[in-house]
Image (cartoon, helix red, strand yellow):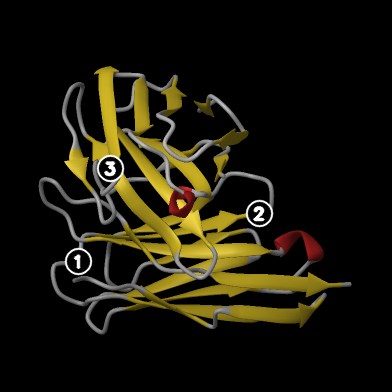
């Protein structure tokens, strides 16, 4: 069964902290994605990666960075967390471009 | 900037009602159109991936159609049940290196018994 896992379901951090959100998929998928979901704004793409060590900016990359050292793992990094980064973060993976994406359970991050 | 519009934003129906939603997308440079269902406290799950103009897909009581020439897709739910309550997302893919899915804001369906 296809599986995408995220390191935490809920996370509370303080303003200015460096935050790591981890995503692991066990399907040997090439592509991985990070989204955030906010009420009224839908799913917005932060970064995606189509290969190990490759990354592409999405629609809202400011304040974030990513790391993909291994095929199965895609990390989202908030260099200095701010309150406007309080959101639901979803990771997804897909075996190719334009095909079905498989989503993780999400991490609800609160920055105080 | 490519935009995907979904309507209505939310919908409340009674059990047994049939309903439909609309997804509008740019008609040029089309590659694929996805529909996802996102239930509360769960992950979004793909319903359909559609690539050809005139495509019709069906899964149980849910079906979808695609018109790439005019840039829209309809999702139909026949005989809605409370378990159909969810947010339905469509996403458009233009294709090409360095591109990714563009999601609409979703239609939230609530079905009461």
- Element carrying mark 1: loop
- Name the residue located 27 percent from the left edge and 25 percent from the top edge: A67
Label 3 in the same subunit as label 2: no
Q: State the residue lying farthest toward the left.
A: B97
**Height in image: B84 above or below B101?**
below
Judge left or right: residue A69 versus residue B56. Answer: left
- Identify the residue under disc 2: B39
Q: CA distance from mark 3 to mark 2?
A: 24 Å
- Element carrying mark 3: strand
Q: Can I make out residue A30 in this image?
A: no
* Mark before the other along the chain sequence, 2 or 1: 1
- Identify the residue under disc 3: A47
- Identify the residue under disc 1: B30
Where is residue A69 shown, x and y percent of the image?
25, 16
- Name the residue located 33 percent from the left edge and 27 percent from the top edge: A29
Where is residue B18 shown, x and y percent of the image?
69, 80
Please count the marks in the image: 3
């Amino acid at each position: 069964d296809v599986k995408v896992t995220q390191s935490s379901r809920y996370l509370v951090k303080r303003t200015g902290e460096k935050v790591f959100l981890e995503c692991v998929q066990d399907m040997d998928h090439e592509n991985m994605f990070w989204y955030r979901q906010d009420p009224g704004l839908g799913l917005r793409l932060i970064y995606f990666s189509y290969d190990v060590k490759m990354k592409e900016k999405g629609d809202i990359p400011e304040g974030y960075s990513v790391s993909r050292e291994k095929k199965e793992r895609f990390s989202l990094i908030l260099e200095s967390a701010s309150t406007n980064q309080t959101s639901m973060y979803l990771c997804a993976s897909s075996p190719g471009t334009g095909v079905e994406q498989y989503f993780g359970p999400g991490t609800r991050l609160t920055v105080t | 900037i490519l935009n995907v519009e979904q309507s209505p934003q939310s919908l409340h129906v009674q059990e047994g009602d049939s309903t439909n939603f609309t997804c509008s997308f740019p008609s040029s440079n089309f590659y694929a159109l996805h529909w996802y269902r996102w239930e509360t406290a769960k992950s979004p799950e793909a319903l359909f991936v559609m690539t050809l103009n005139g495509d019709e897909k069906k899964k149980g009581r849910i079906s979808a159609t695609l018109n790439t020439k005019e840039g829209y897709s309809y999702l139909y739910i026949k005989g809605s049940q409370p378990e159909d309550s969810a947010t339905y997302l469509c996403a458009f893919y233009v294709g090409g290196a360095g591109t990714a899915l563009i999601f609409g804001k979703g239609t939230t369906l609530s079905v009461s018994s």
